Amino acid sequence: MTEAVLGFLGVFLLAFLRVPLAIAMSIAGIVGLGLMRGWPAAYASTSQVIFETGFHYVLSVIPLFVLMGNFVARAGMARELFTAANAFVGHRRGGLAMASIIASGGFGSICGSSIATAATMSRVAYPQMMAHGYKATLATGAIASGGTLGILIPPSTILVIYGIITETDIGKLFIAGILPGIVAIVCLCLAVVFVTWRDPAAGPPAERFTWAQRLAAIRGIWGVALLFALVIGGIYGGVFTATEGAGVGAAGAFLFALLRGTLTPRVLMDILLESTRTTAMLFTILIGAMIFTSFINFTTMPGDLKDFILQFSPNPIMVVVMMMGIYLLLGMVMEELAIVLLTIPVFFPVIMGLGYDPIWFGILIVTVVEIGMISPPVGLNLFVLNSLLPDVKLSTLYRGVWPFVVADVVRLGILIAVPGIALILPRLMG
Amino acid sequence: QTVFTTSSWVPPTHTLTTAQGAWCSLLEKESAGRMKCNALPKAVTAAPGTFDAVRDGLVDISFTVDGYTPGRFINTQVAEFPFLGDSAVPTSVAYQRIYSKYFAPLGEHRGVKVLGVFTHGPGIIFNSKKPVLTAEDAASLKFRIGGGNINELSKLMGWNTTLKAAPESFELLSTGVMDGTFFPDESVASFKLSMIKHATTFPGGLYNTSFVFMMNPAKYNALSAQDKAVVDKISGETAARIFGEGWDKVDAASRDGAQKAQGVQRVQASPAFIDAVKAKQQQLEDKWAAAAEAKGLKNAKGVLAEFRAEIAKAK
Amino acid sequence: MLKTLERLLNWSSGLMAAMALFAIMWLTLIDVSGRKFLNNSVPGGLEMTEILMVIVIFGALPLVSWRSEHVVFDTLDAFIPDWLKGLQARVVHLTCAGAFAMMAWLMTTRAERFAEYGDITVHLQLPLSPVAWLMSGLLLLTALVHLVFVAVPPVAAAHGGPAREGEPS
Ligand code: NA
Ligand code: NA
């Protein structure tokens, strides 16, 4: 355990000196592994991790979902979603923030990536909120947390990866995400209500729409509905797998952007370049996290955590609660995909041994991953907003996001207490 | 005391992991506790990188499928041919004997200390659609396959196959993207392939898979003469038998458990189907013999014949 | 000078990565349609995707470094005096250059290992060693980008990068 703690300290020391997180994790991982297993082994392991993470079929869902998100945004669909949501709730206090959360949920139904969702909504919703005098804390908190709906509401990169490493039905996992997604939207909107109750100036009401305008706005989201039907229908109709669905969805979104006349060769090139850069940025972190993880794998940390958890096994639900506690703590300091890949092989058999449903556990895992993506200091969605909105400081993001983190933790509690929310739809499928 | 770090790229309950654990227990017992293993919580690399991980000393002991690193191993393909045997123990033991006699000196596994080689049980055609009795039946379905000799054979048979990793089988089959897959009996249970309704068996199996169980050579060389003797004693046939017995046990458990519960109908391939496979296999054997002889194996066809005879003898 | 370099990166490794991503998209679509309508999937589609993934990730990496788009903690920025920031940037870029150069070197050892054993892909039998060499080359290019910034710290591009062209609507 000591080695692991020293490793984490090393990562943070380097990161606070402004070394990119990916490089900080790589350095700590190589040095840690070198000291524990010898330098040739550390070098061999690192080169293997780099190759395996890059040369990886399943992980191709990440760039394809990012690409799909960018095409969809270019086709104007994110704006249509926001307008539709805004038409119904915008006139309330904090209404634009709620609209951005609802629209994120809608966008999440055609995009499998939390980061792509947050990035897209930041372009659509942030300027509107600023124009209506919203405080940056509320605006960015709503966008960052709403973005995480991208991995809960199907399709979802994390659920694909969870399904593959635990051999759980990805189709059922996807369906299972729908109701918790709605619960999540409600909880996050309640967080907005709380924030504007404490400080009405954080989110002043915007203009009210007439019912005619509302109906017109709703009709505007047919494109999103069609794309959702294509991807989800294709997966359930047995035409393609969830992994392949990302590629088909990207192609569908490309077609939409093309038909709406929003693509010139120049724009297409920009979208492709931007998507590859986002991919490279994510994979650099992923590779760094994997290098660090292979060091952690040799420490006693995974075993210690398991032993800690097993002492609660006479009371199975406590095992789940403690496990989620560990995930919340790890989520603050680690990258989420790395956490999933490191801990699932250790924790999943424990959960199965206690007789819990792997689909329910998968939804809990996505939920803690969502929280980890917005909980300071290491939260990928916060970093993405920080780089897309240069005038917003990271500390502002940290201050704005906590009511939403609390709302997410409450939602996690609800999902643990009422497994039916996750399980009722997949059970109806049979 | 020497502690060997072990890694496994299949789940902790899988027979490969437990067989590796059984070998480690034997090691501890035979050495009166001077040597033992420490299993890592998570695989040190994905399956294809395992050979290099052992070679580079990242882990001390692990196992891998030779076919996961295509291009590296030629001789070992002999253990992937059709019609080898109906049980993993004799094929594993016979493979080990042939391996020690002919293949080990050629050094295809250079860089690691080979503790044993083995195979799984007979390969079977599984599908969720219809009974497959003939080659035409098989040609009308879409199959997921994993690679190795069966990949070459499918190409020659003209089957509609897609290469995907084994853990994706569930998704591919449950969504109906694919109709079937080729696996030993065990995998229907371990990959929870509850949609499988039909199995087509071949006498001796349609295919098999060559595995190697190995140790980092530097770790081995650093052992005392006494400890080396213990490792040597439980290597080779002893190790092959442990893994083979493990496969046979889980194959039987899947047949009598999961497969029975989900109502899998077993049929044997028609004689015409078997002959069609045999005809194509002949081409593959010729190709293999030429490639193996180019790599230094003498009288490859004779070795193959001896391998088949050895399987018949082994128990 | 720096502008020319950026254009060069965009039109070399960047273009390569962009085309590879576009290709993965079409490859998946063709693979799926072929399987559905023609009863035949693209032979070796999986391994082509894997190779293209390498090009996407490592081809775009020099650009990510060029535009300083790596994730960094800027929490302490407020406490660091301005005179120190230039030095800090140089040291950080030197660290990054060293780390990426080391990764590049490590990938040459992987490439040599693949070559030594003659490793190939399952279906198309493409050799793996050039793929590892490609990773290595692009990692080295990334290291060089950081080296440029050791000499000439990027001024305004310190965070967020230059204004994004063609903001999606
Ligand atoms: Na989604
Ligand atoms: Na995190």
Image (cartoon, rainbow, N blue to C red):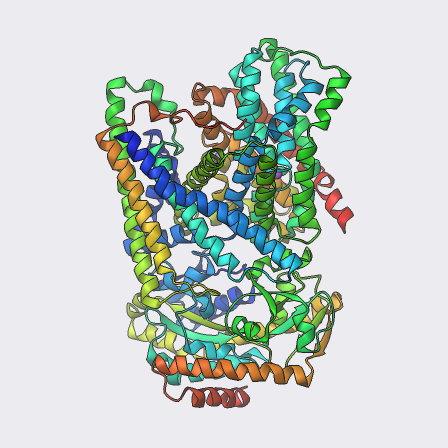
Residue A174: x %, y % from top left: 66, 44
Q: Is residue A255 above or below residue A119?
A: below
Residue A13: x %, y % from top left: 34, 33
Residue A329: x %, y % from top left: 50, 35
Q: Is residue A39 above or below residue B200?
A: above
Find the residue positioned furthest to the top: A201
Is residue B95 something that shows in the picture?
A: yes
Direction from residue B70 to residue A118 in the image, left or right: right
Q: Nearer the viewer, residue A316 or A376?
A: A376
Q: Is residue A156 above or below residue B208?
A: above
Q: Quadrant of residue A175?
A: top right
Q: Nearer the viewer, residue B269 or C92?
A: B269
Q: Is residue A408 above or below residue A299?
A: above
Q: Residue at x 59, y 10 (%)?
A: A199
Is residue A31 something that shows in the picture?
A: no
Find the residue positioned furthest to the left: C151
Q: Quadrant of ligand 1?
A: top right
Q: Nearer the viewer, residue B98 or C168?
A: C168
Direction from residue B115 to residue A227 in the image, left or right: right
Quarter that holds the N terminus of chain A: top left
Q: Quadrant of residue B247?
A: bottom right
Residue A149: x %, y % from top left: 61, 33
